Amino acid sequence: MNPPDDSPPLIELVNLTKTYGHGDAAFQALRGINLTIRDGEFVAIMGPSGSGKSTLMNLLGCLDTPTTGSYRYQGIPVENLDNDRRSLLRRHALGFIFQGFNLLARTSAIENVELPLLYRGLTRSERHEKAAAALASVGLADKHRNTPAEMSGGQQQRVAIARAIVTEPDTLFADEPTGNLDTATTREVMELLTRLNLDHGITVILVTHEDEVAAYAKRVIHVRDGLIASDKINHRNLILSS
Amino acid sequence: MIWNAFLIALREIRRNLTRAFLTVLGVIIGVSAVITMVTLGEGATEAVKQQISNLGSNLIMVRPGAGFGPRSSSAGVPNFTEKDVNAIRDQVAGIAAAAPVRNASLSTIYRQDARTTTTVGSTPAYFQINRWTIASGRAFTEAEYKSGAAVAVIGNTVKKELFGDEDPVGQKIRLGRASVEVIGLLATKGQAGMGDQDDTIIVPLTSLQRRMIGKTSSHDIGMINLSAEDGTDSNALIADINSLLRQRRNLQPNQDNNFSVMDTRQIADTLSSSTKVMTMLLGAVAGVSLVVGGIGIMNIMLVSVTERTREIGIRLAIGATAREVLLQFLVEAVTLSCIGGLVGVAIALLLCAGISPLIGVPFAFNSQINLVAFLFSAAVGVAFGFAPARRAARLDPIEALRHE
């Protein structure tokens, strides 16, 4: 389908393991993951609880470091980066959305969206402009002043998505983004993620345990007992997007 | 980056104003207490000094006994004689005038009104040395001093108590055992560190000795007031007086002075030293409350780190570095304590301006103590904000995000 690409893949995991605890209490959450994700993919990671999918997500999102194995992000080895370097990588290349939305309470939507820009040191007007644009792109142009308590779950998650994309990341990590949402808003959010993937070329990596949600992805990876159990192309979506 | 942290911290403070207010309350109280105490204390010291300097900058006082003020001890020490006074005036270079002073508490009667007044017996030079001016009438003359005339010059308090609105000049009052004519009224001087200066009657020393109490001994001069010529080195003058009096009082080289010579500056220093000690004590007590205020900041900041663990997780996840989180919490603590410091300074100014007229003390604005108290509050913010900030910065983003 795609012509062969010489540039390094976006994400390349080789023999990645993660062990929590020491000695008898040690628990191996990931037992050797090999995975390659290319630019522009929409990947769903599925698996029962305890399968290691959240651990994998944290490692992919550079929130944690692997015990052994290598992780290259755009060709850069990141497995041994220190806390601050990983923070900077997250700041400049990665976006996150979470099941619990994780917006700052008592803070207006626009201020929540401006938050990552604040750490980038943008000026007040630049921040405001970009945040307003991001809010508009998730369909919340009229909700700048609303605080999370004044918005529905779907709206809050859209604010969270705006916050994640306002920095124009390469990759968007979504950790059970629809876990707290009803069917209608789930569809809204997933369509928004699909559009970001198709229109803006943002790579989306999604963790979920719902088949209906995973159905939006182009590629579905099942994780079980710390290993990749299956890695399939979602043909229905490939046809849809081509 | 600091500016950024400052912006984030300001947003954080604005997000929860009640918490911010409660946090800084301790610092506000501490700073305003320190400044108010010290300012009022210094005002009191200043008041004492001002009133002493009303006595005249060239004034030198010689008293029997060692020391002056609170620590003086004059028991069993001989007083001076009029010859001592004359010797100082004639033999010490740089003395403009010398006046013997004998104090006596005398009953003072005018018609049916009676009171007890500290009466000063001296020479006409006394008025000039102690900077008394005559409001009406006149002072007594050299001739009246020599003859021991039955005349008196009264202070304003005595006039008010005995005469009310009546003009006292020319009236006869009974002073001790004698009837004297009031020939003058002193211009008012007001309160001094040692009490109401206007509650006084000045008579010729000779009249006091002969008419009012009777001469008891030749050593009846309780104090000598001197005025130095302008531009005289008062230390040299005091040394000269010391050596002259040691000789006249037959002191051996191994004996300490049984008298003391002080100029107004020393008198002021002695009297104000006690108010200074008081000021320092009050300031220290208030300083403790400032430290307690700092502990309040630490307490709230620690609670707030726990309460905001999830928020810290969010910040770390979207790319804040540990340093930025540390800086944010530190700047937040410092900003809070600085705001507290500024509010404290403002409240202290209001308090001082309100209280000082009530207690009759000048409002001596001291920029130094304001600055010190403010800087101390900022330092409190750094010192007590650091531990919570470090705790926040060390959080693991994954753990923090899971925190409920």
Image (cartoon, coloured by chain):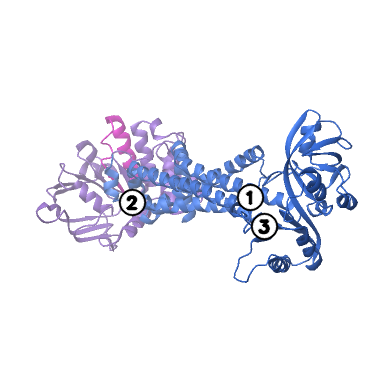
Which label lies toward us, 2 or 1? 1
First along the sequence among labels 2 and 1: 1
Is residue B91 in the magenta section? no
Which of the pair A36/A173 is nearer the observer? Answer: A173
First along the sequence among labels 3 and 2: 3
Residue A162, position as x, y percentages in the image:
39, 42
Residue at label 1?
B45
Q: Is residue B333 left or right of residue B46?
A: left
Amino acid of disc 3: Pro
Tell me how far mark 2 sits from mark 1, CA to CA. Answer: 47 Å
Residue A157, position as x, y percentages in the image:
34, 37
Query: Looking at the image, which residue is at 82% across and 47% down?
Result: B207
Q: Is residue B178 left or right of residue B312?
A: right
Residue at label 3?
B78
Q: Do labels 3 and 1 share a chain?
A: yes
The picture quadrant where one finds residue A206 is top left
Chain letter for the residue marked with disc 3 in the picture: B
Chain letter for the residue marked with disc 1 in the picture: B
Residue B52, position as x, y percentages in the image:
71, 51
Q: Residue furthest left?
A: A24
The picture quadrant where one finds residue A17 is bottom left
The picture quadrant where one finds residue B231 is bottom right
Chain letter for the residue marked with disc 2 in the picture: B
Query: Looking at the image, which residue is at 36% across and 57% down?
Result: A88
- Start-end of magenta stretch: A171-196
Query: Looking at the image, which residue is at 62% across and 71% down?
Result: B253
First along the sequence among labels 3 and 1: 1
Q: What element carries label 2?
A: helix
Rendered blue, the chain in question is: B
Rendered purple, the chain in question is: A
